[in-house]
Amino acid sequence: MTLAEMQFVLPNLSPASAEIFLLTMACVIMMVDLFVKEKTRALTFALTQITLVGTAAVTVLTSAGLLSIVIAVLLGPDASADLTPRIVEVFGIRTGEEITYTFSSMYVADLMGSVLKLTLYFTVFVVMLYSRSYVLDRPQMAKAEFYTLSLFATLGMMVMISANHFLTIYIGLELLSLSLYAMVALNRDSVTATEAAMKYFVLGALASGLLLYGMSMIYGATGTLEITGVAERLYMGQANKTILIFGLVFLVSGIAFKLGVVPFHMWIPDVYHGAPTAVTLFIASAPKLAAFAIVIRMLVNGLIVMAQDWQMMLIILSVLSMAIGNLAAIAQTNLKRMLAYSAISHMGFMLLGLVTGVVGGDARFALNAYSSSMFYVITYALTSVGTFGMILLLARAGFESDELDDFKGLNKRSPWFAAVMMMMMFSMAGVPFFVGFFAKFSVLQAVVAAGYLWLALAAVFFSLIGAFYYLRIVKLMYFDPPKDMTPIQAPFDMKLLMSANGLAVALLGIFPQALMSICAYSLLRSL
Amino acid sequence: MEFKTFVFYFLSAILVFASLRVVTSRNPVHAALYLVLAFFTASGVWMLLQAEFLAISLVLIYVGAVMVLFLFVVMMLDINIDRLREGFWSYLPLGSIIALLMVAEMALVLGGSYFDLFENAVPQTGIAESNVQAIGRLMFTEYVYPFELASVILLVGIVAAVALTQREKRKTKAVSPSRQVFVKAKDRVRVLQMPSEPRD
């Protein structure tokens, strides 16, 4: 075959324009930073934030479905019906109304992906803002790499969210993980950070190996790596069931490692504890969204025919995570470590929504169940950002503020931030009328609707145990005398955002309906 | 048994043995050499699959470049790897029991029957083109998206390596020519007048 005979069709680049924009900007920021003086490093930060806003704008303007949702949230449904078609016409948007594939079906653009990506940019934006003063106070970390690696990690998560091929999922995951390993180790002089990075790297590599092995088994059984292709082969019953299940075990183990659920949770406490708090904040929030997306892509989009098999595995992981996460969190004295165990239990709770999608071969409840999980993971990212952000708010040069004792008597130092932290803790514990309550409630009603009453009871029981250590922080803040009375030295923008974050947790608890219907609608249009 | 099958099992046996020796040999130089053997045999297996280009690039890149560099580093660092792996031999019995148990369980699950794969044969393109051509064509058309992303991963690797190893600006020993030409002899050399001492 000669060159002239080759049929080369340029892939449709427009659905992936957000990724292209982000990558270009990350490279530009890297170059710009070389010419920036130490004192004007603020420029790098500003460019990073502008990039995230720009990427969000590109994402909205390439997806008609997302555009109509965004306008409806900002201006109301009437304005959306009126404005959306006009903007769509002006920008010539051709994608986003239905599921679009590009790059030889390796990339998928659908509404669920767009909504998750928008939440992702928002989370990373908030993370960067919270981290700013912490990073500036620590000369080891105050380098452009913190920002560029964050952007590359964001790119990896975007690739994971809109992957329609096992290869793309793996590459996106590696892009995310490699950036995170380096970010954890960024503070080189800290022994704990280096140890955390080593553990994270070794266990992460092991998890990637498990995931790849599972993928290779599924390739062996179906002859394709494309997720929609795998689903097709499975529907036609063309695959060897034994090898599929064998591969599925490894696939689920790999996912469990990345989500950090028991028994693959050992890295979470050490990494959360050892990493610089700014990096912990990053690891604890945004990657959960991407991990949720790959679970949906691989297990729901690709292997829904095998739902009976993977649901059983996820039930075990979920119950174990809720039990061990909540029980081990009680014994911690370090807040970051406690929140790490809390993250394990929350991810277990989130999995509950995924295990109830198909009951006895009947997928009637799927939409309800998966959207409750999506709601859970989005609100968890929001609350988690706020809680770790609070540690950053109280930290200053040479002081980490990550012990439980550091929160003693916060009410005396700053009544407002004590109240904000209390709202976060109530939401995490699932106290009614904070957003965490509705997240738990919607997952539980999905579980009960699917007929797993014992599972719902177990979840409530472990949540009650979990409430103890969340409420202990409230007790420390309000009823214990403060250890030091240093006023909070955080910059104004961070204080403002923290207040907004706390209010969002409270307000979303009172009006959860909008976000819930966005989750349900986006999944309805994507599955 | 067909000759090809025999070659496959022969190469696989060497591969398994070499990989085992990589993790068990006490001398790091030996371990690295076994890794070279493992790569070389793996390239032989690829050759059996008619993937000549991949086989040759494995030898050229891994054996020729990466492993030679690796050997140099191992020889230069003079690590006492035995101390690094102190726990290895004491954990080996328990570890190997668990590993054997897992292998046995996997064998039970798979029922011992031969893997009935979707396509047993090597996929044939049907077009008479060379390996290099086929890979190049696929890489830049169908797989262009993961290919580009792989380059981003390499970029992240570079950024991370620089960020983690670069210390403050090192004082360079290079001379500045402009300052050099202005140097005068009397700045550098001090001629001392000393009375000569008589030898006693």
Image (cartoon, coloured by chain):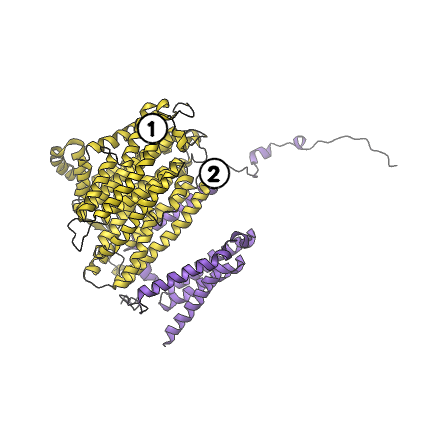
Q: CA distance from mark 1 to mark 2?
A: 26 Å
Quadrant location of the N terminus of chain A? bottom left
Q: Residues within 10 Å of mark 1 (few under 14, many from 20)?
A: many
Q: Residues within 10 Å of mark 2 (few under 14, many from 20)?
A: some
Give the mark nearest the N terminus, 1 or 2: 2
In depth, the one of A504 and A423 nearer the eye is: A423
Place of residue A187 in the rendered image (x, y in percent of width and height, measured from the top left): 45, 38
Report the residue at 45% width, 67% height from top. Answer: B14
Q: Which residue is mark 1?
A: A494
Q: Is residue B45 visible?
A: yes
Residue type (three-letter) at the residue carrying disc 1: Met
SS at mark 2 in the image: loop
Q: Is residue A127 visible?
A: no
Residue type (three-letter) at the residue carrying disc 2: Ser
Q: Chain of mark 1?
A: A
Place of residue B83 in the rendered image (x, y in percent of width and height, measured from the top left): 54, 52
Q: Give the chain letter for purple.
A: B
Q: Which residue is mark 2?
A: A190
Q: Are marks 1 and 2 on the same chain?
A: yes
Q: Give the chain letter for yellow.
A: A
Place of residue A99 in the rendered image (x, y in percent of width and height, measured from the top left): 18, 48
* Res B43 quadrant in image: bottom left
